Each structure stands twice: as structure tokens, then as C-alpha cells.
Amino acid sequence: AQSVAQPEDQVNVAEGNPLTVKCTYSVSGNPYLFWYVQYPNRGLQFLLKYITGDNLVKGSYGFEAEFNKSQTSFHLKKPSALVSDSALYFCAVRDSASGTYKYIFGTGTRLKVLA
Amino acid sequence: EAGVVQSPRYKIIEKKQPVAFWCNPISGHNTLYWYLQNLGQGPELLIRYENEEAVDDSQLPKDRFSAERLKGVDSTLKIQPAELGDSAVYLCASSFGTNGETQYFGPGTRLLVL
């Protein structure tokens, strides 16, 4: 069965410092991996995805993520955090080998960027 | 391009009352999803439509929840009767296809059952 884990409930980082939000996954086939961000009282907004190809994926607002097959990870990164990046971040995975086309979301990581 | 539209944004009802949520997906998106999001949790799929066909409703509590997408465009999710535990945010998302395509989410409907 497919699953995704976000081991940190909250990540605090100072403005201007690099940030990392962690995500690990488990699938039987090749993964489709996504990062979404959610601001208060808003729906989820797409940041980036990995389907195939280059392991380093660049997305919106300066975010990027690195697919690591051996560690089954897809950590979200940004070189220099902004206060406006403070939000709830969700990792999601879909098993390409699964016939259900079901996306599993992590429990979310709250990012707090301190001025 | 307009995003996914949901209404109402907020709804407060008493337990045992019925409630309905409406979703209009992005134009041209044939796949529509309804998710349940509890406080502090990630979205959980309730039902997925491809055009007008419900292709995955395995997580939908069919004793009280129902959904329809009659013309393969907008969709309605209904709860009857609502229970206290149904208080949550109900998210609608759409995508063009299902094979790795990005899902685009609406703002959600926040339901409070008293």
C-alpha cells in the first residue's frame, strides 16, 4: 500500500536562511510526487511535482524539491526563506503502478519563517 | 482562467439536518475530486469522477453521503443527515486526466455541525 510521511509537524527558520521540509514515501511502483501549500482559509495551491526525469524539480515561488529514490524521499527546499512563505505544506504521492489513481497526502508541516 | 469554484464557503447546521456543497471545476478538466480535510490533517479522498462516472467512491460513507456530477461538469456533495463528526473542510479539486496530472483545488467549504 502506498503511504507518505511528513515527520515534522512544524519547522521554524529565520528569514533569509535556507529551509527544508521533509517528505518520505512508500509505493510499490514508481512514484508521482507533489508538493502543495495551504494558506489560512484557502485551498491547496500546487508548488511542484516529480513524474520522471531530472531528480531536482523547480517549482513556484523559488521552491525546489529533490527526488531521492534510494532514500524514498522528496524534500522541499528553498535557498532563502521569506516571512510570506509561512504556511502549511503538504506532500502527496501516487503510485504509478496502482490502478486506483489515488493520491495520498501527508499530514502536513507548518512552516514558520521568523523575521 | 477561473479556478475551481466552491460554494458555500461556510455552513453551520444542526446535527441531523441535510447539507449540500457545490463545486464547479476548471473548464476542460474532466476529472473531479471531493476531499475531506480535518483540522491539522491532510486531505482524504471521498470520491473521484472521470467525466460523469464515479470511478473511485470507496472512501465515501454511503449511508449518509452522496454525490453527483450529472453532466460531467459541476458536482454536488450531500450529507443527510449530518453528524457532529462531519465538521470539517470539504475540498473540491479538478485535473485534466488522472495519470500524474496536477490537481487544482478550490477554497473549500468549512462545515460546522452543532
Image (cartoon, coloured by chain):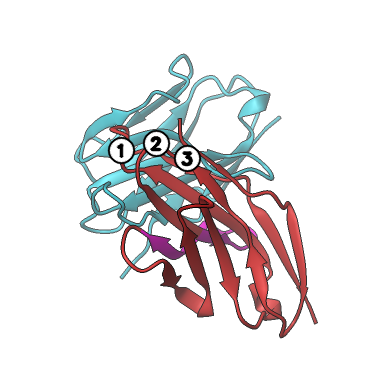
Residue A30 part of the magenta-drawn span = no
Q: As drawn, is A78 to the left or to the right of A26?
A: right
Q: Are marks 2 and 1 in contact (CB under 8 Å)?
A: yes
Q: Kindly give the residue lying farthest to the top in the view shown.
A: B63
Q: Are marks 3 and 2 in contact (CB under 8 Å)?
A: no
Q: Is residue B74 visible?
A: no
Label at residue B35? 3
Three-letter code, disc 3:
Tyr
Label 2 marks a residue whose chain is A
Residue A28 in the image, given as x and y percentages of width and height: 39, 36
Q: Which of the 4 image quarters holds residue B56?
A: top left
Label 3 marks a residue whose chain is B
Q: Residue at x 62, y 58 (%)?
A: A22
Q: Main secondary structure of the magenta part?
A: strand
Height in image: B19 above or below A22? above
Quarter of the rendering occupied by the C terminus of chain A: bottom right
Magenta-drawn segment: A36-50
Q: Report which residue position mark 2 lands on.
A: A28
Residue A44 part of the magenta-drawn span = yes
Residue B51 in the image, given as x and y percentages of width and height: 20, 41
